Image (spheres, helix red, strand yellow):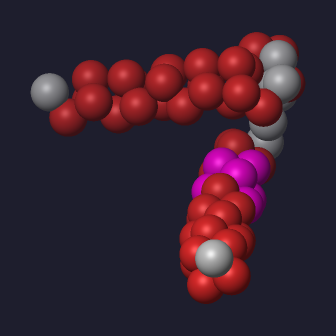
Amino acid sequence: MMRYDRLANHLSTNAKLIQNYNYSKADIESFIPWERFVVIDLISQKQKNDAAMMRDHQATAARQK
């Protein structure tokens, strides 16, 4: 089961990179092995930063009402 979970996660992540971040399948397949992890980490950091900025913006807007 563990191997399937890892494969399913791998394929799901690839699909998200293709659909949401405009990577092609060829781009992903040509990554150096560690490069995929770096790209995913950078996207994750950006999502966290965007979420924090949104929370800050919403809090500022709520205080101004």
Q: Nearer the viewer, residue 52 or 23?
A: 52
Q: Position of residue 65 (x, y in %)?
A: 63, 76
Residue lying furthest front: 65
Q: Position of residue 21 (x, y in %)?
A: 78, 32
- The answer to which quarter of the image holds residue 59 is bottom right
Q: What residue is drawn where x is 27% and y is 23%?
A: 4
Q: Provide residue 40's location: percent of width, then percent of height.
A: 66, 49
Identify whether 47 is placed above or below 54. above
Horizontal arrangement in the rendering, residue 44 relative to residue 3 (left or right): right
Q: What's the magenta region? A: 38-46
Is 30 in front, or is 42? 42
* Residue drawn where x is 27% and y is 30% of the image: 5
x and y, in percent, of residue 2 in the image: 20, 34
Residue 43 falls left or right of residue 1:
right
Q: Is residue 45 magenta?
A: yes
Q: Is residue 4 magenta?
A: no
**Could you tell me what secondary structure mostly forms the magenta stretch?**
helix
Of residue 17 and residue 25, the one placed in the foreground of this image is: 17
Query: For the N terminus, which image quadrant?
Result: top left
Q: Which picture quadrant has residue 45?
A: bottom right
Residue 6 appearing in the image:
yes
Q: Residue furthest left?
A: 1
Whether residue 54 sits left or right of residue 4 in the image: it is right
